Amino acid sequence: MNKMIVFAMLLCTASTQLQAQTDSLQRLGIQYVAEGRHQEAVRTLLLAGADSGNAFVRSQLGLAYAGLNDFPNARRHLCESVALAPDDVPRRFVYARFLHLSLLLNEANAQYVEVVRRDSTYGAAWFQLGQISRLLGAMDSLQAAFYERALAVNPEDYLSLHYLGSILLDDTTNSRGLRLLEASLARNPQFLPAAERLASYYFGKNLNAMAIQYYRWCAELRPKNPEFQFYLGESFRRLRLTDSAVVHLTAAIGLDSSKSSYRAQLGYAYFLAEKFDSAAEAYRDAIRIDEDTPQYYVNLALVLERLDATEMAANALEGAIRALDPHQIGLMYEKLGGVYFRAGDFQQSAGAYEKSLVYFPENKEASFYLAMALDQGRQVKSAISRYRGYLRLIADDTVRNARHRYIEDRIQYLEGLPQK
């Protein structure tokens, strides 16, 4: 009998020691999980029997596997931890986040829904439901409802403020979006998406002073981002503050020299400042990067006209013509005709307008100015014929304007001249 008692005591002591050892290994494994030492955590927790343990240690083992990107084992243990303790809302939320990050969106959504069903004050789950619904392409109104619930639980949630504000900002009848985005940025001044959303909103509304305020904010957060410098430059250009526009557009080019649009807009800023030589050089740089954008040639031609470089302007427009479809070619020859007309070269002007009508026969402006160029070039018969052709082209117009009357008077005058 005494031997049996002694054996039982020894067995109890051994069991107690084994349990103490197991508990110690579990605590160490959990510590490793917290420290991000996932390989050691898995090894230690398995030694502690976590793969057959309670919900908590199973969850910790699942997190350790997740840290190793071991998807099958992570999913199995996290799922089992939820099954063992279905009312443990935080543990279910951990499982939902794992599914979310693994892009199992529908499964994650179901778990988040279950979290808020069991605890409607779990704000983090409401926020994640908003995120999931966005990825699943749900209507904005549903996404907004989830973020509203998250903010009802935690009004300081800067992410929910941002996403809800962004959704409401697209609704032109709701001014609350701006206030929410500003509140998001106030709570986290380092949160670039809120600053950028506000900047782009004000830029799109042509509220350039406000756009400058927020693009400066963006540029301070990301000083090496050329887009922020570019939009700062554009905002200043719109306000006709050309010196500041040039500074920021030049900075954008310094950060990314491959964008033709940066150089083209720098050319525009110089043009507004009447620094035509600099404008011409900027447009030439844009064309060197992208020779297929007709507008660059057109703008270069406008600059060269200001420099009285008629032939160079004409060459620039010829470059634009090579990059266009037939209809656009007709419009471009019209512009070329205007360059020569303003320079007083009526023969070249008439030739360009004639080419315009070949590609775009219904071009009323080209038809009128062709007649004018022939008239100014003393080609009387041809001018009369073209004036009449223009009147036929506008025969369906119901309004007799000053140009109409001018043409009729001019035809009468030209017909009265001695014929050569």
Image (tube, helix red, strand yellow):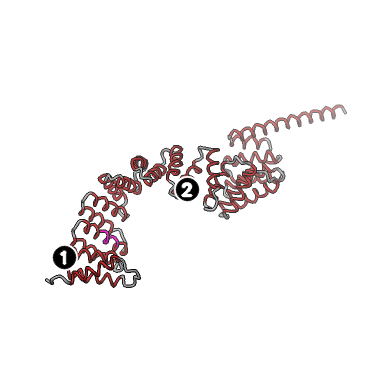
Q: Is residue 43 left or right of residue 315?
A: right
Asked whether the beta carbons under mark 1 and mark 2 sit within 8 Å of each other, the answer is: no
Quarter of the image with the N terminus in it: top right
Question: Residue 37: percent from the left, percent from the top?
Answer: 58, 34
Of residue 44 and residue 304, the one placed in the foreground of this image is: 304
Of residue 266 and residue 86, the one placed in the foreground of this image is: 266
Q: Which residues are magenta?
A: 331-335
Task: Look at 19% across and 58% down and name the residue there.
Answer: 344
On whether residue 267 falls in the magenta region, the answer is no
In front: label 1 or label 2: 1
Q: Is residue 397 left or right of residue 94?
A: left
Q: Which residue is mark 2?
A: 201
- Position of residue 312 relative to residue 246, above or below, is below
Of residue 383 and residue 15, the one placed in the foreground of this image is: 383
Name the element at disc 2.
helix
Q: Is residue 151 left or right of residue 12?
A: left
Q: Quadrant of residue 41?
A: top right
From this viewpoint, is residue 106 visible?
yes
Question: Residue 265: percent from the left, percent from the top?
Answer: 34, 47
Task: Look at 16% across and 67% down and name the residue there.
Answer: 379
Distance, label 1 to label 2, CA atoms, is: 55 Å
Residue 406 has which mark? none
Q: Quadrant of residue 353?
A: bottom left
Of mark 1 and mark 2, the one earlier in the sequence is 2
Is disc 2 surrounded by few (<14), some (14 to 19) or many (20+) residues within 10 Å? some
Magenta stretch mostly in which secondary structure? helix
Q: Looking at the image, which residue sits at the far left?
A: 420
Q: Which residue is mark 1?
A: 378
Please state which amino acid type lies under the numbered disc 2. Answer: Tyr
Please state which amino acid type lies under the numbered disc 1. Answer: Arg
Is disc 1 surrounded by few (<14), some (14 to 19) or many (20+) residues within 10 Å? some
